[in-house]
Amino acid sequence: MPEKSAQLKLFFTKKLLEWNQKFNNREMPWKKEKDPYKIWISEIILQQTRVEQGLDYYNRFIKQFPNIKKLAQAKEFTVFKLWEGLGYYSRCKNLISTAKFINEELKGVFPDTYEEILALKGVGPYTAAAIASFAYNLPYAVVDGNVTRVLSRFFSINIPIDTTEGKKIFNDLAQSLLKKGQANLYNQAIMDFGATICKPRLPICSSCLLASNCQSFSNNTTNSYPVKSKRISQKERWLYYLVAEYNDRFYIRKRAQNDIWQNLHEFLVIEMDLPKTTEDLLKSKQFKERIASEFNIISVSKPYQQKLTHQLINGVFIHLKLKNPVVFEDFVLKSKGQIKRIAFPRIIDGYITQQNMFS
């Protein structure tokens, strides 16, 4: 068994690098990049984000902030506005914090060891391995969803990838497969292979150079991998946004509470346990506590949705024109010009864009 395993490993690495050299035509602006700053930007953007979506964001970030100093010295609201729509805004907060740390504490020099990179805020083992291998060709294997899927299928590994045991097994296996002196090539190859050939659905086994020794392919069990032990439970929330307008300005606040979308902005909001009609909402105690002034209803939006990892957000926007100013804790009146420059969660930005409110 150990001999067979060793032979399989040698075959896997050899064929993967052969595929990369002959057939990998996947083009991305950060491929073959050696600047650790640009690699870091790409990896942070691509956390929890599809490449197709992240590509434009990466190009805009590098254009506006071509180096660590430019990012570190930028106004935070400018960075958040550029990030708007990507979600998982803690990534953006960590990005700003890390840029300032490197610029001020490390004199603008990006760390060049795996341990120092891993110690940066917002950088985990995968991102540290990616930066270390792509920028410095250090021997650290990347392990993400693409990698675990490829390895679990090829070696027919039935241990769930989301367990402590599974994570150790896949990390150790990935590390043992690295080609000495070619960590950068190997890591890029396995990620691209998982994205283009060994895809989550409808893998292209007919074009796979590894198929002859792929354990799940020979057993016709490809779609059974990777194995997961648990499903993500999703909480559903109903948010009713009161787009309260007075004298052509709108009540806005920055979210500061320990909840989703921290540091982004929002209109007045009422959260309900269950969906409500507009009529029931206007009669509710929560609405009357917030809107004591006389008002006219300008419009009521269709329901909007935004899916997060553990939450499904439903949002309805009720545009109100107030006849008198009111005082809302933490909320300030902002003009249309000011609102254009601040960042909102995707669900609110979608409403603003569709209504063409502030153009």
Image: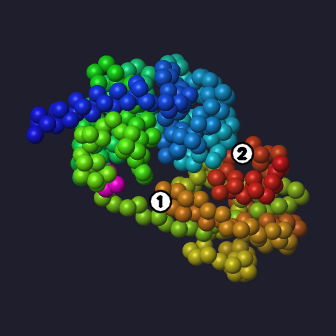
Extreme residue in the front direction? 206
Of residues 245 and 30, the one nearer the viewer is: 30
* Front-lying residue, 135 or 187: 187
Q: Main secondary structure of the magenta part?
A: loop
> Sequence order check: which comes first, mark 2 or mark 1?
1
Q: Residue at x 65, y 57 (%)?
A: 347
User: Under tag 2, what secondary structure?
Assistant: loop
Vertical comparison of 283 with 151: above or below? below
Does residue 31 appear to the left or right of 168 in the view shown? right
Look at label 2 and name its amino acid.
Answer: Ile
Per the image, the residue denoted by label 1 is 310
Crowd class of label 2 (few under 14; some 14 to 19; many from 20; radius 10 Å)? some
Tell me where residue 247 appears, x and y as whole percent.
89, 58
Relative to 175, say whether 347 is above or below.
below
Q: Residue at x 40, y 24 (%)?
A: 21
Q: Identify the residue position indicated by label 2 in the image.
A: 342
**Could you tell me if residue 105 is visible in this image?**
no
Residue 82, image x and y in percent? 66, 39
Q: Position of residue 228 (x, y in %)?
A: 32, 56
Q: Which SS class for mark 1?
A: loop
Magenta span covers which residues? 223-227
Q: Is residue 348 found left or right of 167 in the rendered image?
A: right
Q: Is residue 166 left or right of residue 289?
A: left
Label 2 to label 1, Cα distance in Å? Answer: 26 Å
Check residue 24 for magenta coloring: no
Three-letter residue code for mark 1 = His
| Front residue of 181 and 266 | 181
Residue 92 image-quadrant placement = top right
Quadrant where the image shows the N terminus: top left
